[in-house]
Image (cartoon, rainbow, N blue to C red):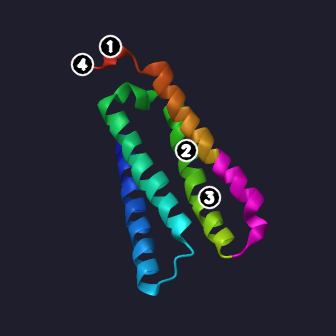
Amino acid sequence: MAIRCFKLAALYLILGMTLGAVMGATKLFAYAPVHAHINLLGWVSLTLAGLLFTRFPHLAKTRLAAAFFWIYNIAVPVSMVLLALEVSGHTGVETALGISSAGIWVGGVCLSFNLLLNLHSSDISA
């Protein structure tokens, strides 16, 4: 699970940085929200999840971890495409964007509950 998080995070890093470079080169910054969300939700959040699963491997073996991984990694790319469409003026995607954003939230809640329920002080070595 950790390796999959790291590899997907690396892809998001490439995508986010590429979008940022294209925006800078063209001076068209309309996609700045997409760029920021790709970097934060893709690169940063998945890297942190991968680090958690590496440090505490028992967390990666739970149903909550699987739910987080699949819900989150389906919702994030869908949301990024819909966000790009919305900032391009396609206002008809707002409902779908809201639903996919809720999927990101559900994924985050799964990861959070996994930590709250399955991470114990005895897991932290001195």
The residues bearing labels 4 and 1 have C-alpha atoms spaced at a distance of: 7 Å
Whether residue 31 sits left or right of residue 1 in the image: it is right
Range covered by the magenta-colored residues: 89-102
Name the residue type under label 2.
Answer: Trp
Disc 3: which residue: 79
First-in-chain label (4 vs 3): 3
Local crowd at mark 1 within 10 Å, few (<14), some, or many (≥20)? few
Local crowd at mark 4 within 10 Å, few (<14), some, or many (≥20)? few
The residues bearing labels 2 and 1 have C-alpha atoms spaced at a distance of: 28 Å
Name the residue type under label 3.
Answer: Ser
Disc 1: which residue: 122
Q: Badges 2 and 1: C-beta atoms under 8 Å apart?
A: no
- When the figure is inspected, residue 92 is found, relative to residue 44, above or below; the finding is below
Name the residue type under label 4.
Answer: Ser
Quadrant assignment, res 125? top left
First-in-chain label (2 vs 1): 2
- When the figure is inspected, residue 37 is found, relative to residue 108, above or below; the finding is below
